[in-house]
Image: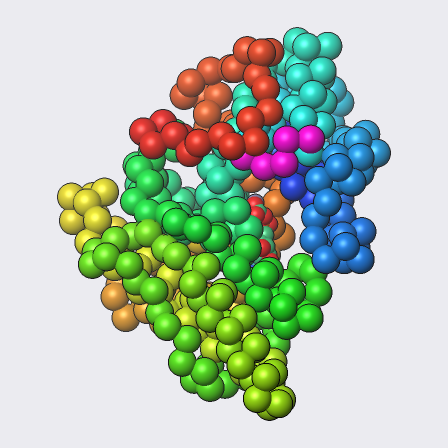
Amino acid sequence: MKDGKFITMAFESSCDETSVAVLADGRQVLANVISSQIDIFRQYGGVVPEIASRHHLENINPVIDQAMEESGLSWEEIDLIGVTEGPGLVGALLVGVATAKAIAFARDIPLVGVHHILGHISANYIEYPDLKPPFLALVTSGGHTNIIAVDDYNRCRVLGGTRDDAVGEAYDKVARVLGLGYPGGPKMDRLAKEGNPDAIAFKRVYLEKDSYDFSFSGLKTAVLNYLNTEKQAGREVNKADVAASFQQAVMDVIVEKAVHAVMEQTQNGGRGEKKLVLAGGVASNSKLRAMLEEACSTRGIRLYRPSPVLCTDNGAMIGCAAYYKYRELGADSLDLDADPSLELPEERL
Ligand code: KG4
Ligand code: ZN
């Protein structure tokens, strides 16, 4: 405790960011140190799991030291340790989990494992101090595309998800075939601004009527086919037009489904304030933000969007989720293990 405030230290290492954060009372960020490996993986065109684990191992202690220094706290003041237990790359997750367990054991501090996606959603509690469940969350990241009814801090219902590629994954794959390099999402976002979103009529995939599921692999194949056809015909491809048209086809579907879900779904029995909360790396996308702002304002939906540093993988979001899990459900045991394919619990996040 520090000045009567409950202090959480949290670890995130599920992919290629090593991050350690320190929070007061769950929502106040005292430190959020993020060491990204993006520069290392640019040369490989994507994340190489073994190399990611090795870098997490090298980075974790310096990142802890920096977080402690920035927080200005001593180890005696830490009340809770939170850590991403999954999903993610197993070797990468293990570094965070082993470190968190070691500190929890050595200092006799309670330990809580966090689902990575609940962490992404919780980034909004930090950004918006007054935000409370219930609300509807749109989670768009490199590994997930979900519409989730968040009924309470530790209770949710997954209304829909992707049946194949996650949206960030689709962005990264299309970016690769366009030769844009890694990480593809932000580069596609920038390039699309220079292109015409109506240049190529890629099919919008809505699936069954009223379904909140997504499918992006067909769109990815359509982009590949378009590029091959143009190449064979000897025509020069306007990459900005391809990026803009792909992005429009993705976002038309995501925005329509998310807004429909807020209006239709029953989390408030049709009553209450309409709230849409964005989460995950793709929540930084400028087109998604602009389209949702417009769609939400015309329908009386309040839109919540974390700032870019809280959209990307970071320890602060994990610390916030850990705080609310610990308050309601108590600590996990030291048997906690990394689970690369941890399911999003439907009734209990
Ligand atoms: O949430 P995140 O940092 O990691 C996962 O949990 O997956 O999301 C990373 C994903 C990557 O696929 C990246 O290309 C994508 O988010 N991304 C974007 C943008 N910024 C990041 N996709 C589209 N537009 C962006 N501006
Ligand atoms: Zn993530």
Q: Quadrant of the C terminus?
A: top left
Viewer-side residue, 34 vs 272: 34
Residue 295: quarter of image: bottom left
- Which residue is at a point 72% across and 22% down the rendered structure image? 99
The secondary structure that most of the magenta stretch takes on is loop
Q: Is residue 91 left or right of residue 214?
A: right
Q: Is residue 193 above or below residue 107?
A: below
Say above or below: 130 vs 94. Answer: below
Q: Residue 7, position in %: x, y?
A: 61, 25
Left or right, residue 184 beside residue 265: right
Say whether residue 244 is visible: no
Residue range corresponding to the magenta coloring: 87-91
Q: Regarding ligand 1, which quadrant of the image does it lie in? A: bottom right
x then y, percent, for residue 328: 41, 21
How many tags in the picture? 0
Which color scheme does this rendered protein use?
A: rainbow
The residue under the point 15% across, 43% down is 269
State the image coordinates of residue 211 (x, y, percent, origin top left).
Answer: 25, 53
Is residue 183 among the parts visible in the rendering? yes
Q: In this rendering, would 251 be left or right of 317? A: left
Query: Horizontal and vertical percent for residue 274?
Result: 27, 53
Q: Is residue 39 left or right of residue 97?
A: right
Q: Who's the residue at 34% across and 64% down the image? A: 205
Question: Within the magenta stretch, is there residue 88?
Answer: yes
Foreground of the two, 266 or 209: 209
| Residue 124 forms part of the magenta stretch | no
